[in-house]
Amino acid sequence: MFTLVEMKDAIPIPASELGKPRPIAVANQIEQKYCNRILLECGLCISLHELTELGDGLIYQSDASVHIRARFTLLVFRPFIGEVLVGTIHKSTPSGLWLSVGFFNHIFIPPHFMLDGSEWDPDQRLWIWKSEHGDAALDPDLGSQVRFRVTNSVFRPVERPSQAPPAAAATAMPAVVSEPEEDDDDEPVFQVMA
C-alpha cells in the first residue's frame, strides 16, 4: 500500500528558516512542498521518510532563499495490483461505488467488478446486492466498511496551464500536482480502481 520513492531536488530555504539547523529547515520545506500532493506515476505523497544527502547552498541574485540540493526518500501511497484493502463507502452513483481509506477517497469500483446480483436502486440511490435465490438482500449504506481488491492505478494528465515560465517548466525535475478541490465533474488526477 505504501512505497518509498527516492527523489532529488533543489529545495529553497526562505530567510525566515535560516536560523534553524539545515536538516530541519530542509525537511520542513520538503514536507511543505510534497506532502498531500500527487507525484505523477508514483502516487500520493504522505510524508518525508529520510534525508539521505544535503548539498551546498546556492544563492541566486534575484532570490532571498538559499537553494540546497537534497536527495531524500518520500513515503507514497500507491497500492499494488491485487492488494486487498478495507475502505468505507464514500459515495454511491449509478456508474459505481466510490470508497475512502480515510486519507484518500478516489477509489472506484465499477459495476462489472461488484458481486454478481448487484444492482442500482434509484429510490435509495445506492447499490444493493441480492442473492441468486432472492432470499437475502444487502444494501450497504454510506460509511459502511467493505473489502476490495485493487485492479489498477490510473494517472490522468493535468490539463491546467503551468504557472511557471516556459523555460522553467521545461527543466522542472519532479512532476508534482496539487490535489484539486473535489468536484463531481472533474476526474481525479490519481485514481485507484478496484
Image (tube, rainbow, N blue to C red):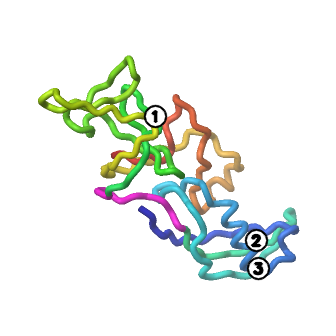
Residue 15 x/y as whole percent: 87, 68
* Residue at numbered disc 3: 22
Looking at the rendered image, the disc whose residue lies closer to the viewer, 3 or 2, is 3
Q: Is residue 53 magenta?
A: no
Mark 3 or mark 1: which comes first in sequence?
Answer: 3
Q: Percent position (x, y) of residue 74?
A: 55, 68
Q: Let me know if residue 76 is in the magenta part.
A: yes
Q: Which mark is residue 91?
A: 1
Which stretch did the figure color magenta? 75-83
In the image, 146 versus 45, the foreground residue is 146
Determine whether the residue tagged by mark 1 lies in a helix, strand or loop. strand
The residues tagged by marks 3 and 2 sit, at their Cα atoms, a distance apart of 11 Å
Q: How far apart, in angstroms, are the residues tagged by discs 1 and 2?
A: 43 Å
Check disc 3 and give the amino acid type. Answer: Arg
Classify 18 as above or below 181: below
Task: Find the residue positioned furthest to the left.
Answer: 133
Residue underneath mark 2 = 67
Q: Position of residue 175 (x, y in %)?
A: 57, 56
Pointer 1 with pointer 2, Cβ within 8 A: no
Above or below — where is 28 with respect to 194? below
Q: Mark 3–mark 2 contact, CB under 8 Å?
A: no
